[in-house]
Image (spheres, rainbow, N blue to C red):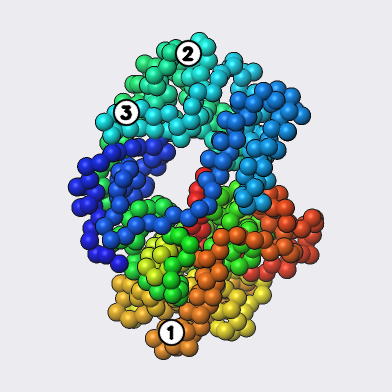
Amino acid sequence: MSTQDPREQLSRYQGALRVWASDTESYAARCGVFSAAKVRRRFTAAGWERRYGDDPFMLGVIRKIIVALHRDERTATWEGLQEALREQMAQHADLHPGLRSFVAHAVEQYLDAHDELASQYGDVRFVTFDPVIGSQGREVIVWAPLYCSADGVREVRRLRVKKARSSAEEPDRWATVAAYIAAGIRMQTPPAKIRVVEVGLFDGSAAVVFEGAPDEVRAHYEAHGRPVIKGLIEPTEYRPGQSCQKCKLAGCCPSLQDLSGCLGQRRPGTHTRSVSAADLELYAKCPARWYLASEFRLPADDTASDASDRGRVIHRWLAQAHARGTPCTDQDVAPYGQAGVFTGTLTAEEYGKVREFLIAHARSCPLSGGGAEVVSVEPSVYGYDETADVVIASQPDLVYRDASGKVVVRETKTTTQMPADESDAFDRFFPVPWLINIACTAKDAFGESEGLPKIELEVITPGEARVFAWDLERDQDVVRMARAEVRQRASSWIRDAAWSPSPGRQCTWCPVKRWCPAAADAQSRADEQSQEYDEPCTGLLTGASE
C-alpha cells in the first residue's frame, strides 16, 4: 500500500470538474478527500486504479425503460402498457431475476405516480435526464428526469428506491441544487416556477419537497448550495467510512489500515469490492439475499427475527452504557422507573423485553474488573486488502484496555442457548474468526498495542453471561483456524457474479423474498422462527445505500 498522500495529487489536478447534486448531501460527515476525488472527473491516483464490475445500475435501467414508455403511445391503456413493459423487460433479460422483479414493479409504480402528479399539478412533458449547467470544465449536474409544462413550470424528480419522504430536512441541499440546475437549463419557454418532487419506486408515493419562483431558487442556492459545492472541491480531511467502498483512492489511502492478505486470497476477485463480517455471514445463508438486500437495498419486508430485534435493542443499551466509561451495575438494570436505573434511549417496552439479558451482562461487564479503560465503543474500522483488492470494514462492540494495559476487543452476542466452550463459540459466531484475522493482520487496527490484542466474546442468555477469550499470541492453532474460516467464506463471495439463491426454510422470513422467484412459497410459522436462537451478525453492512 502506498504511503504517499493522495491530496498532493488532487491539488495538482487541472482537468474538468463536475459536482453532482447528491454530492452535497451529508457533506460534513463525508470524507473530504473522497468528495474531491469524485469531483475531479478524469482523476486517477498514481499507482492504483479502481477496478469496476459489470453489475447493472438498477436505477439507470428503470429510467431507461421509463423514457421508452413515455414515448410509447400504447401506454394510454392498461393492456398496451403491459405489452410495452414486457417488450422493454425482454431487453434486460440478463438482469438478476430478483432485480427483474423489482424493476418491473418500480416502472409501474413510477408511471402511476406520474399520472397522479399530472392530475394534481397539470400535464408536463419529459425533457431530458441528467440536466447539467456550467462551462469551461466546471459543471453542476443532477441525476434526475426533468419535465416541463407549456406555461413554464419545470419539474425535476428524484427517484427513491423505497418511499418518497413525507418531509425533507431544511435546507435540503439536493433539492436546492436540483432546482437551481432546472432553472438554469436553456429552453424555449423561460421558467416560471421550479418544482422538486420525490417519487417512491416501491409504493408510487410522490411528495413535493421544494417549489418556488426562479428568483427564490437562485437565492436559496447562493445561501445553501454554492458554499457547499466550493467546499467539495477542496481535498480536506480523511474520514474512513461508507465512502471508501466507492472511492477512487481506496487502494492508496493512508487513512485505511493495511490489511493486505487478511482475506487469504491469492489474487483479486472480479472487481474492487467492500466486505464486512455481516456481509459474509449473510452471503453464506443465501447469495441472492445478500445481493438484493445489501448490494441494491431493495425494499424489505419487516420480518426480522426475534433474535435480531432483541440483539439491536441490547446493543443500543450496551453502547450507551459503556460510553459512560463506568462499569454496569445492578442498579443500572433495576426495574424500569426505579431511581438510578439506566435505560438510555430504550422505551419501557423495550427495556422490559431485554432486562433479563442486561442483568446477566452487568455481572460480566468488562469495566467491572478494576483498572479497565474504554478505548472506543462500536468503532468503525476500515482497511484495505491489497492482495484481494477489497476494502474491509469491521465494527466490534467495545475496545478497552484491561488493568495490565492490554488492548481487548470484545464482541457481544445474545442467544437462548449458551455455547458449550470456546470451540463451540468460535464455530457459531463468525465475528470471532473475523476479528482474530484482522487483529493478526494489523495488530494496531483497533488501537495502538504493544502485542496482539486479546479477543473476547460475551454471550448473554436470559439467565447468564459467559465470556469466551482467545489469546492470539499463545494460541496459534486458533489463529490458523480463523484464517482458514475467513479464507473459505471470502473465496466464493469475491468471485461470485451470479448470486444464485439458496432456497430453504430461510425463505420464510427472508426480507426480500417478494422479489425473489426462487423463494419458497410458505407462510411464517412460529416454530420455524423460534429455531433461530442466535443473534445474527449486527456489524456493518457495506452495501450501497439508497
Q: Quadrant of residue 367?
A: bottom left
Residue 134 image label = 3
| Image: 428 above or below 338 | below
Judging by the rendered image, the residue that carries numbered circle 2 is: 152
Q: Position of residue 431 (x, y in %)?
A: 52, 71
Judge the density around disc 1: few (<14), some (14-19), many (≥20) Cα neighbours within 10 Å: some
Which quadrant is the N terminus positioned in?
bottom left
Q: Are marks 3 and 1 in contact (CB under 8 Å)?
A: no
| Image: 470 above or below 221 | below
Q: Which residue is depicted at the point 40% across and 74% down? A: 261
Q: Position of residue 540 (x, y in %)?
A: 49, 60
Residue 471 image label = 1
Who comes first in sequence, dot 3 or dot 1? Answer: 3
Q: Which residue is depicted at the point 56% across and 35% down? A: 63
Distance from the alpha carbon under mark 3 to that under mark 1: 59 Å
The kind of residue tagged 3 is: Gly
State the residue in front, 46 or 300. Answer: 46
Q: Nearer the viewer, mark 3 or mark 1?
A: 3
Who comes first in sequence, dot 2 or dot 1? Answer: 2
Q: Which residue is depicted at the point 58% across and 38% down? A: 62
| Image: 48 above or below 296 | below
Distance from the alpha carbon under mark 3 to that under mark 2: 21 Å
